[in-house]
Amino acid sequence: MGKHVGQTIDRESDQGVPRRLAVAPPFDLARTAAPIWWARGRWPNSDWRQRTLYWVGWEAGRLVWRAVRQMDETALFVSGSGDPELDKAWAKRVLGVGTEMPRFGVEPLRDFALAHGGMKAWAAGSLYEGVISSLVGQSISVASAAVTEGRLYALFSDPLVIDGRAFWAPPRPDQLASAAVELVRTSGVTTKRAEALVEVGKRFAEGAIAEPHAAGFERSAVSAELLAISGIGPWTVRSGFLWGLGDPDAHPSGDVALLRAVRRRLPHVKTLKDLDAAAAAWEPYRGWAARLFWLDLLGYDAGSVAG
């Protein structure tokens, strides 16, 4: 990914003493970062290794990075180039700090919630990034999606090398909006998806689709705007809300991996139609339910749990 060396950073020597960020227990960084770990180092702008979560992205118009470790139940330690004054907001947006595991009245979710109570709703931190990732990941495995996403990101920026590992930030909406479809296609996506990615960039760049913090944001209107783009269907929109914003009730209807995860615990759920019917009992926390079933299927880096 990428042709340039980019900037190289040594986390320990370049950033000094990590900043302490208080969290309310229960909080488990390893379980929260499980979706990053599932790709085994392939995501372009995030990684989980050696008990550390790495993240690279845009903040207040700047390209920044953060490395996060958990030393006990009450604190995270954050280093990196991100503004320390924005650490708390970043942790809320990306790590789901402040969210609480819901209580489920049905099995196996009741037991999952008890076993994984420290898991929070990890997200990209923006609807735009969630939709981009979901578009790239349509109908392919997590590993393949991560590799393709990496090729896409590398088209728009040089790498940031942190502790020997290269990271690429997501393309900004204006960058994607002005890109040729043929260029986007070289990342490995189909022509139709490349066209959809460019259109998503345009609509976010122009303000036709807004992030939740914008005045007048309405989920139904935003969903309709996204569905109007050729190549985007309900699964992509719901997955965008789930992984972009940590939406608690986003149900990725039609997700084969979720069906596999649910079926191993609920054998009567045999089809995608059965999955949608079962999910009705998980409202208004279908997004949390999906995370728990995936965590049960794919696991997390148990050797890296704090303490």
Image (cartoon, helix red, strand yellow):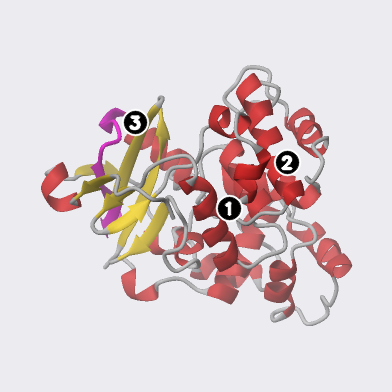
In three-dimensional space, the C-alpha distance between marks 3 and 2, rounded to whole angstroms, equals: 32 Å
Name the secondary structure under disc 3. Answer: helix
* Image-quadrant location for residue 127: top right
Name the secondary structure under disc 1. Answer: loop
For the N terminus, the image quarter is bottom left
Mark nearest the camera among 2 and 1 is 1
Q: Main secondary structure of the magenta part?
A: strand
In three-dimensional space, the C-alpha distance between marks 1 and 3, rounded to whole angstroms, equals: 32 Å
Query: What amino acid type should be assigned to the residue bearing mark 3?
Result: Leu
User: Residue 196: which disc?
Assistant: 2
The residue that disc 3 covers is 86
Q: Is residue 35 above or below residue 112?
A: above
User: Residue 187: which disc?
Assistant: 1
Q: Foreground: 78 or 64? A: 64
The residue carrying pointer 1 sits among few (fewer than 14), some (14 to 19) or many (20 or more) residues within 10 Å by Cα, namely many
Q: Residue 166, image x and y in percent?
A: 34, 54
75 in the magenta segment = yes
Query: What amino acid type should be assigned to the residue bearing mark 1?
Result: Ser
Q: Residue 106, image x and y in percent?
A: 71, 68
Residue at 71% x, 33% y is: 199
